[in-house]
Amino acid sequence: MDYESAAGFLKTLAHPTRLRIVAAVCKGERCVSNLENLLELKQANVSQHLAILSRAGILRSRRDGMRTCYRLADERVIAILEILGVELDSESWECTSQES
Amino acid sequence: MDYESAAGFLKTLAHPTRLRIVAAVCKGERCVSNLENLLELKQANVSQHLAILSRAGILRSRRDGMRTCYRLADERVIAILEILGVELDSESWECTSQES
DNA sequence: TACCTTAATTATAATATTCTAATATAATAA
DNA sequence: TTATTATATTAGAATATTATAATTAAGGTA
């Protein structure tokens, strides 16, 4: 991987909301409304960050009726967050029946 | 490390020039003019990127007469670049006597 | 002292990122 | 069909980042 690509990849990760999303999905799928509640952010904003992570290949999505579920697609981000000592558990949160 | 700090750290790294600087110093010290020649960038620009990396604690500097030598101060960045498969050797380059 | 070299700082314009609000799309239900 | 829910997209202003040029500062030498 060249410096340009590596910098682009790191830039994709380099946002607190996107790191929280990664932490939230690293134990399993989450739909957008669930992330919206968890992160307490506007729907459009969550959707935009999800699009950025998906475009970079870090997340992958799956349609489930009206919902879209996102999951981690690149395990390397976990390794990177572990090196930095990020507590991945801090974004674990139960889904309610209405959310997923 | 919280998400805000981790994102800040990654943002510091997330620039091709800064990654090239990290790769250049990971085998040993380099002075600014040497980096300037290696990277083929303007002095001011190199100095600015060095300042960004130093502020983040990724590099440390040492005065040597008229020169300032920079070295890697945080080995975690090497581990991160290895995860991404970045070829760190691509920025190795001999210093001339005039440069260091 | 004056001069030269190296590096850091400042100012600025160009570009990129981010969040919000508004709108559009898509799936489902009534 | 119309309405509702979930998500995506677009447009925008505000903010941040970047590279260049100009200036400053600091170290060494004649």
Image (cartoon, coloured by chain):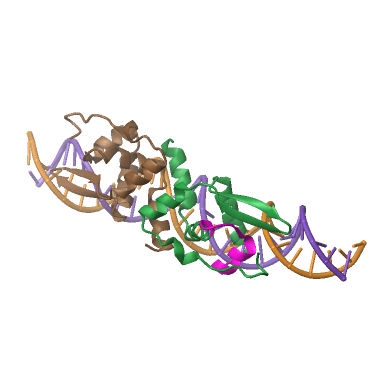
Chain colours: A brown, B green, C orange, D purple
Please tell me in which quadrant of the rendered image residue B29 appears: bottom right
Q: Residue at x 40, y 50 (%)?
A: B80
Q: Is residue B38 magenta?
A: yes
Which residue occupies the foreground of this view, B26 or A98?
Answer: B26
Front residue of B93/A59: it is B93
Q: Is residue A91 left or right of residue C25?
A: right
Quadrant, the C terminus of chain A: top left
- What span is colored magenta in the figure? B25-42
**Observer able to see residue A11:** no
Above-or-below relation of B7 to A11: above
Q: Is residue B12 magenta?
A: no
**Point 44% across, 41% down: residue:** B6
Query: In this rendering, would A97 be left or right of A53?
Result: left
The answer to which quarter of the image holds residue A4 is bottom left
Question: Residue at position x 57%, y 53% from top?
Answer: B71
The residue positioned 25% from the left and 40% from the top of the image is: A32
Relative height, residue A82 to residue D30 (above, below): above
- Position in image of residue B41 (x %, y %): 57, 67
Q: Position of residue A52 (x, y in %)?
A: 33, 51
Residue D25 percent across, percent down from the top left: 77, 53
Image location (x, y in percent) of residue A46: 32, 42
Quarter of the image for the N terminus of chain A: give it.
Answer: bottom left
Depth check, front residue: D15 or A34: A34
